[in-house]
Amino acid sequence: MKSSSRTVRNNGLYAKRKSGGFSHEKAVTRLMALVMGIAMAFIFSACSNSNTEPSAEPTQSSLQTPSGNSQCSVNENAKALVVYFSVPDNQDNSYVEINGERLGNTQYMAYVIQENTGADIFRILPKNPYPTDHDALLEVAQEEIRTNARPEIEGTIEDFDSYDVVFVGYPNWNADMPYILYTFFESYDFAGKTIIPFNTHGGSGFSGTQETIAQLEPDASMLEGKSISRNNIEGAEQEIIDWLDSIGMLKAGN
């Protein structure tokens, strides 16, 4: 299955974070994420913050790479891929309507990134489709957490090794990545690549998932990503473009 040939048509999803206490395991996970967050802050601090106004020139400073080199933007000739996960949802704030077509919030971000970088695009689809009812979907997401599930992905990315930069997009589910993202990261070798996360959320931002990705892929470089609230996504196109420009990924002519 070609990574650039999959057409995306479905909506995005935000499974709400369920109120109530956390298990001991979840608390330990949160503590580890906090510690990693402090450590990663030193790595990200030299880079332009994706949630603030970008500087006129991409910042050429430090994200630590496996080889010890550091750079905030990437080579202009790098081959890029946008990978994203987005699931239909029956709630109004889970999608953006563009020219009569409903696009999931994460899907919309992926489209804007693809259009303005010229990257190939691949949608993560589960072999067993998720329910489209929000409450039912929330239950499935919580069950995946309880069982540490690895949902199977439909199809594969052809010639993944040829890509230098991989944008990875996902909604915030229960203050984490959807567990199918863990399947994705465990299925491909990211050594030597640059990962750029992007995320949509209902108020919790990345929730430490950038640090989680750094743990999962220690041999990859990572640029600080872009996180946008579902309440702001509809008018966020220029904000996304400015972010791409700030990290040196905006294609020529834009």
Image (cartoon, rainbow, N blue to C red):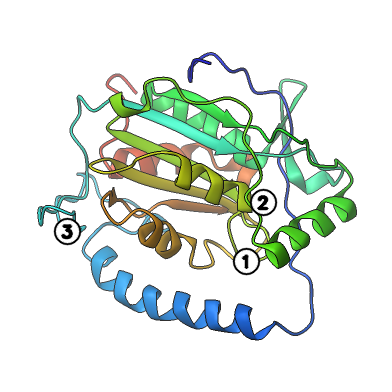
Number of the front mark, 1 or 3: 1
Q: Name the residue under label 2.
A: 230
Asked if the residue under mark 2 is in contact with the one under mark 1, i.e. CB atoms within 8 Å, the reply is no
Q: Which of marks 2 and 3 is nearer the N terminus?
A: 3
Image height check: is 191 above or below 31?
above
- The foreground one among 209 and 66 is 66
Number of callouts in the render? Answer: 3
Image height check: is 24 above or below 58?
below
Residue 175's disc is: 1
Percent across and percent down for residue 60 are 14, 50
Q: Which residue is drawn at 48% across and 67% down?
A: 208
How far apart marks 1 and 2 lie (CA) works out to 15 Å
Image height check: is 114 above or below 185?
above
Q: In this view, does 3 lie to the left or right of 193?
A: right
Percent across and percent down for residue 134 are 86, 50
Kind of residue at badge 3? Ser
